[in-house]
Image (spheres, grey):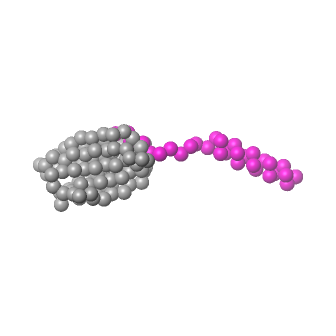
């Protein structure tokens, strides 16, 4: 009797592993300038780390996606941004003629996870 219970349990565990959805990494859906902020859209939430690199604002998101770049104006000065894949992460760099500092926030809207990066001159 105990062997039947054990066999049933093992069979259930094996079927559960086979039929369970495979977790996937977040994927970048789009990136665009929105006023004086950069808006990134992902299909699901992703871990974010931020820092500064020689006056530029650098943000690393544990997600995958394609290279994108653009520019907008911040306090009348040009600001260039670039999203590029490096390993299993996306590196987002914001660069201006003046040193930058910044903050970011995230929201979930319409089934997407949105990361809004607001850069400010130091």
The residue lying at 76 percent from left, 50 percent from top is 9
> Is residue 113 visible from the viewing direction of this image?
no
Residue 44 placed where, x, y %? 44, 46
Residue 51 placed where, x, y %? 30, 59
Closer to us: 15 or 84:
84
Position of 89 with respect to 6 (left or right) is: left
Give the overall secondary structure of the magenta segment. Answer: helix
Closer to us: 110 or 44:
44
Residue 63 magenta-highlighted? no
Residue 4 magenta-highlighted? yes
Position of 84 with respect to 94 (left or right) is: right
Q: Which residues are magenta?
A: 1-30
Residue 79 placed where, x, y %? 19, 47
The residue lying at 40 percent from left, 48 percent from top is 89
> Within the image, what quadrant is residue 27 found in?
top left
Position of 22 with respect to 73 (left or right) is: right
The single residue placed furthest to the left in the displayed view is 76
> Is residue 95 visible from the viewing direction of this image?
yes
């Amino acid at each position: 009797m105990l062997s039947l219970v054990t066999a049933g349990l093992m069979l259930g565990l094996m079927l559960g592993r086979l039929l369970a959805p495979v977790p996937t990494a977040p994927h970048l859906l789009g990136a665009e300038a929105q006023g004086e902020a950069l808006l990134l859209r992902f299909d699901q939430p992703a871990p974010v780390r931020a820092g500064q690199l020689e006056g530029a604002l650098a943000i690393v998101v544990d997600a995958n996606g394609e290279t994108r770049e653009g520019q907008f104006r911040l306090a009348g000065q040009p600001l260039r941004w670039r999203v590029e894949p490096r390993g299993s992460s996306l590196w987002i760099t914001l660069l201006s003629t003046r040193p930058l500092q910044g903050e970011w926030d995230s929201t979930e809207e319409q089934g997407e996870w949105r990361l809004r990066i607001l850069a400010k001159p130091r």
